[in-house]
Image (cartoon, coloured by chain):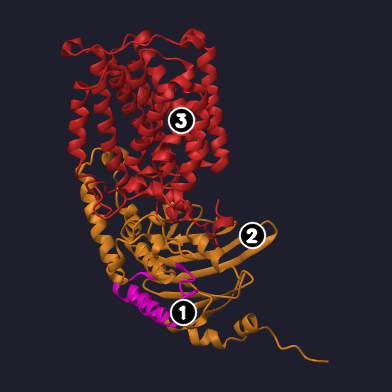
């Protein structure tokens, strides 16, 4: 296939459903679906980095927080309007992503995981202790965009804004994974030395993946703060990272649609377990184990049969054999 | 001017001297065989040319330009393609996508262009697909275009890997033991393929081989390494008869007391 395959014949139907849904959803459900759009975006960003580019990085919850705080603070401190604060916050987060990506140029696997996890913890610590800027553990009251000029209430406005951003960013990711950039990601993940021998610049490819995932998390963070009208450190802790990780693993690593499916299932579970918070972590852990054992290619792999309404090449092979190449111990 | 010139290249890993003062030139549209017993330094030499190993001494020149110390992706971008020992296809990409990776050097689309499906992205994709299909047709693998790289047999993967290298439109093609593990008919097909690469595309080929038959049949000239040093060079049949080569491969007769 390779080229710009059209993914889904049902796509227009799904879009129409999403546009019309608020008419029948109560405000709580509308809020949950809004959150789903946001998490679908952040999960997609993580999937591009982890599933496609194969970078074992766990800074995404922190990027999500950077986006949320940056968008809010740009409005609170610099009086920027939301339409400027959101993209600026996302770009700032993308810049942070480029910096966090630097160690990935030297480290891989568990070492990279530890360094990025540490970055997440430092960010979390700063959110709590730099109270003068962040409001500390009790958080900030985040400004929300004003939709009165359009004549629609705030909750409904956020619903459509998040829907629009999700559609845009999913389309963008579709283009990226079907271009030379996306192929280079997968090549770097599967076999760095061969990728280089095909003129792929590792530094550029890895940095691009980090910038991309941070940008997606930044947009999602900005939308999250505006939807909740509140930013607090606890939204961006280690559990948030587990949540996002669960989304991409459950949905399907190396799949665009899988990111959305995983976000839907994990978020749905979290919301239905609101009353029993203590069981959440156990259940997510269990869900991860069940998925890895019985559905290693994720929920999206259930959509693979001839004539399936979703056509997407899945770039993930759960049991890849180790490669032994003569150059391996000698490569830099 | 020589496509490739190595000048007194030396490489050591710790105390182990892998290559000592090796000179090597490959002429345009020449097939050069590189042979030698295990551990002779053949793969190290390929890694030096493709930039994976930086030599402690000596220079590497491509068409007169000094490329010593450049990163592998820069050297690939200058028109050096290579294959690896063992099958090195990207397993989750289709055969066609694998070969399209060879077009990376010839395309420029960045993140933003791809995200908005820019016209350049669509044109480059179409062009890359056409060129990749042509490369697959050249190695007789076009019918496998939509199969996954990881699904193919070993021999098929080798053919696709050569197509991927050819899609890069290299001036120099480095092959690391392309015949290893292939059945005799496939070795014969590889013979023909490499000669077509030289004759129809005018690409210089440097082929490292453990199996002597292939090298002797198709090479215009052969270089023999032993223990990191060049011990012979010349036309295949002369090299075969060289006493130093025979000694390196077979050892010396030991007198019984």
Q: Based on the displayed image, in which of its 4 quarters is residue B39 positioned?
A: bottom right
Near-viewer residue (B158 or B170): B158
Q: Is residue B201 magenta?
A: yes
Q: Is residue A200 magenta?
A: no
| Residue at 30% in and 21% down | A29
- The reply to whether label 1 and label 3 mark residues of one chain is no
Check contact, mark 1 vs mark 3: CB within 8 A: no
User: Chain for mark 3?
Assistant: A
Looking at the image, is A298 positioned above or below residue A74? Answer: below
Near-viewer residue (B79 or A192): A192
Check contact, mark 2 vs mark 3: CB within 8 A: no
| Residue at 46% in and 30% down | A243
How far apart, in angstroms, are the residues tagged by discs 2 and 3?
48 Å
| Tag shown at residue A52 | none
Residue found at the far right of this picture? B257
Q: Which chain is orange?
A: B
Residue with the mark numbered 3: A243
Q: Secondary structure at mark 2?
A: strand
Which tag, 1 or 2, sits closer to the chain's start?
2
- Image quarter of the C terminus of chain B: bottom right
Position in image of residue A146 (x %, y %):
24, 11
Residue with the mark numbered 2: B12
Residue with the mark numbered 1: B221
How far apart, in angstroms, are the residues tagged by discs 1 and 2?
27 Å
Q: Which residues are magenta?
A: B175-204
């Amino acid at each position: 296939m390779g080229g710009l395959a059209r993914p889904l014949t049902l796509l227009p139907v799904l879009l129409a459903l999403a546009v019309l849904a608020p008419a029948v959803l109560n405000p709580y459900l509308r809020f949950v679906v809004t959150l789903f759009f946001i998490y679908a975006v952040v999960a997609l960003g993580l999937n591009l980095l982890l599933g496609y580019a194969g970078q074992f990085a766990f800074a995404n919850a922190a990027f999500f927080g950077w986006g949320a705080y940056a968008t809010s603070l740009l409005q609170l401190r610099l009086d920027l309007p939301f339409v400027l604060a959101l993209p600026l916050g996302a770009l700032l987060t993308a810049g942070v992503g480029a910096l966090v990506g630097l160690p990935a140029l030297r480290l891989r696997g568990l070492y990279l995981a530890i360094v990025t996890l540490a970055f997440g913890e430092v960010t979390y610590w700063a959110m709590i202790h730099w109270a003068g800027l962040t409001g500390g553990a009790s958080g900030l009251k985040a400004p929300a965009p004003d939709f009165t000029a359009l004549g629609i209430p705030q909750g409904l406005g956020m619903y459509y804004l998040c829907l629009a951003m999700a559609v845009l960013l999913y389309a963008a990711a579709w283009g990226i994974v079907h271009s030379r950039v996306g192929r280079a990601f997968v090549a770097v993940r599967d076999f760095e030395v061969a990728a280089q021998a095909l003129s792929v610049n590792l530094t550029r490819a890895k940095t691009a993946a980090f910038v991309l995932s941070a940008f997606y998390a930044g947009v999602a963070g900005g939308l999250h703060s505006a939807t909740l009208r509140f930013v607090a450190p606890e939204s961006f802790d280690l559990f948030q990272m587990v949540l996002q990780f669960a989304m991409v693993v459950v949905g399907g690593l190396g799949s665009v649609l899988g990111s959305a499916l995983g976000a839907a299932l994990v978020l749905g579970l979290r919301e239905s377990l609101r009353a029993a918070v203590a069981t959440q972590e156990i259940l997510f852990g269990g869900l991860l184990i069940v998925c890895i054992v019985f559905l290693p290619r994720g929920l999206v792999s259930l959509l693979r049969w001839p004539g399936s309404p979703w056509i997407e090449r899945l770039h993930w092979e759960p049991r890849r054999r180790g490669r032994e190449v003569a150059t391996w111990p000698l490569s830099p | 001017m020589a496509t490739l010139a190595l000048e007194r290249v030396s490489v050591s890993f710790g105390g182990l001297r892998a290559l000592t003062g090796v000179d090597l030139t490959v002429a345009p549209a020449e097939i050069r065989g590189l042979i030698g017993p295990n551990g002779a330094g053949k793969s190290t030499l390929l890694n030096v040319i493709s930039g994976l190993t930086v030599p402690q001494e000596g220079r590497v020149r491509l068409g007169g330009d000094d490329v010593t110390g450049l990163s592998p992706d820069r050297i690939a971008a200058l028109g050096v393609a290579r294959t690896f020992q063992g099958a090195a296809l990207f397993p989750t990409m289709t055969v066609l996508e694998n070969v399209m990776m060879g077009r990376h050097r010839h395309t420029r689309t960045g993140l933003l262009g791809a995200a908005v499906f820019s016209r350049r992205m669509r044109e480059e994709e179409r062009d890359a697909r056409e060129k990749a299909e042509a490369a697959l047709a050249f190695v007789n693998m076009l019918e496998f275009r939509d199969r996954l790289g990881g699904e193919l047999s070993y021999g098929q993967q080798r053919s696709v890997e050569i197509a991927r290298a050819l899609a890069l439109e290299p001036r120099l093609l480095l092959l690391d033991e392309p015949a290893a593990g292939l059945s005799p008919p496939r070795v014969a097909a590889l013979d023909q393929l490499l000669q077509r690469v030289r004759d129809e595309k005018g690409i210089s080929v440097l082929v490292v081989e453990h199996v002597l038959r292939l090298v002797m049949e198709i090479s215009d000239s052969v270089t023999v390494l032993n223990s990191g040093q060049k011990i012979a060079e010349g036309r295949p049949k002369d090299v075969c008869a060289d006493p130093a080569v025979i000694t390196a491969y077979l050892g010396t007769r030991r007198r019984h007391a």
